[in-house]
Amino acid sequence: MKKMLLVLPATLIVISLFVFSGCKEDNKNPTENIVSADKASCEGCHTDYALLKTVYSPDTTSAGGGCGGEIPHIEPFDRVYMGGTGYSEFKLSYHGKMNCVDCHNGIDKTGDKKTAHSGDFISHPSTHADEKCANCHPDIVARTKNSIHEQGWGQKSMVYTRYGVSNFDQLPEELKAGYKTNCAKCHGTCGDCHVNRPKAGGGGLYKGHKFSKTPDMTDNCIACHISRGGHAYLGVGAGTIPDVHFTKAGYKCTTCHKGNEVHGDGNIYDQRYKMPLMPECTNCHAGLQTVNTYHQMHYNTFSCNTCHSQDYNNCGSCHVGGDGARIPSYLGYKIGMNPIPETKNYKLALLRRSLTAPDTWSQYGVLNLAQFDAKPTFKYTTPHNIKRWTLRTQVDAGKACYDKCHIIKEGTSYRNKELYLFRSDLQDWEINADLGIIVDGRLPSGWQLPQ
């Protein structure tokens, strides 16, 4: 998939999977699997950078792209090197005092790479969290196994609902495999936040195997949440500025998104806004309903982001495994009818164009999703690009407070109409899916729009 890529300095580029692919058997040069006796151990091999460059096996497949753009390439020997920043801290930690095979299985004290990674070797122990993590972290493991972060239930529900079944397991095996290859790369396990670079950032060890209690905002969070979260929060888009919570308060992702929310509460939520531990604006901002005229008029009508967001990334019509997003990434802004009124109690809300199209999964045996129209293609959104005064709320002197947001008839044209989602904004194949959220015939009669 081709999407907007957030370009960061090399030192800030991130990872995801605790990959040991660099230590696979090299059939072409079997003698390179043998290391000297003084390096004949897990730690001895993985702390010797020169040795790793000698015995590594080159990548044979591409890591592929994702919602954040092409995945940066990190060499196999760099992904498994236990050195550099963080390694000494790791060695002094509780995890660093454990034997490598306690978590990874395999065979220690051998100079043969094939033997070391034989049998039940696990490159990424947190993929076996019940066995490898739960002894010390039982509560977190129990909660996280059904979390949105680990399972991506919201994405999965969109796929199986549009396919026409009641759960993800009922999908054809080929489609499930396609989802795993293309969509699951940003839904990781404990290690992807606390030990590794996420796969979307290149994969491999992060800071010499150091276990970080709090994930790094750039190298972990934004590595996966690039095109929407990080792109907006850091003000990457042309004409935008960083989120006020970043510039004024220095907030990191975990300031608002606490560990309990990220780890989950053990329950399955098929839509992320249903998660009761998600942060709300009112957690910090009290007395909003009467703070000014805008709030007095619209507090229960619009979501907060409707007024306080800048333009944000959109893209759509993705053909997974094929030509990617056929509606390329663009900065936009659309208000429509709230698509999740059962979860968020607003009449109108900010919407973001989603990736899906009827033939999204045609490369995986599903030419067209039978129930595609069951979900809209524009989704409820909360961009992380907040400003107090935006293009919609800051009006010129002497103008009415609604001058930049209400649709105003001027002769035969309508100013501000582009802010709202009308039927005319949709591709032909989107119309039926979005009939419930377009604003045609649903806006105030005083705006003099044709009915």
Image (cartoon, grey):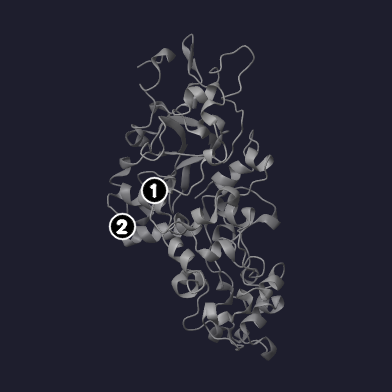
x then y, percent, for residue 433: 34, 37
Q: Amino acid at mark 2?
A: Leu
Q: Residues within 10 Å of mark 1 (few under 14, many from 20)?
A: many
Q: Nearer the viewer, mark 2 or mark 1?
A: 2
Q: Between residue 76 and residue 252, name the one nearer to us.
A: 252
Q: CA distance from mark 2 to mark 1?
A: 15 Å
Report the side of 69 relative to 449 (left or right): right
Q: Residues within 10 Å of mark 2 (few under 14, many from 20)?
A: some
Report the side of 312 relative to 358 (left or right): right
Q: Furthest residue to the front?
A: 287
Q: Between residue 299 and residue 3, name the one nearer to us.
A: 299
Look at the picture and state if 71 lies above or below 206.
above
Q: Amino acid at mark 1?
A: Thr
Query: At 55% from the left edge and 35% from the top edge, which residue is drawn?
Result: 286
Which sits earlier in the primary sequence, circle 2 or circle 1? 2
Q: Furthest residue to the top?
A: 411
Q: Secondary structure at mark 2?
A: loop
**Which quadrant of the rendered structure holds the C terminus?**
top left
* Residue 11 visible here: yes
Give residue 171's mark: 2
* Residue 235 visible here: no
Q: Secondary structure at mark 1?
A: loop
x then y, percent, for residue 129: 47, 70
Query: At 42% from the left edge and 32% from the top edge, which residue is drawn?
Result: 346
x then y, percent, for residue 390: 60, 28
Q: Quadrant of residue 376?
A: top left
Q: Which residue is mark 1?
A: 360
Q: Quadrant of residue 107?
A: bottom right
User: Decide: marks 2, 1 in contact (CB < 8 A)?
Assistant: no
x then y, percent, for residue 345: 40, 35
Q: Furthest residue to the bottom?
A: 37
Q: Between residue 64 and residue 154, name the one nearer to us.
A: 154
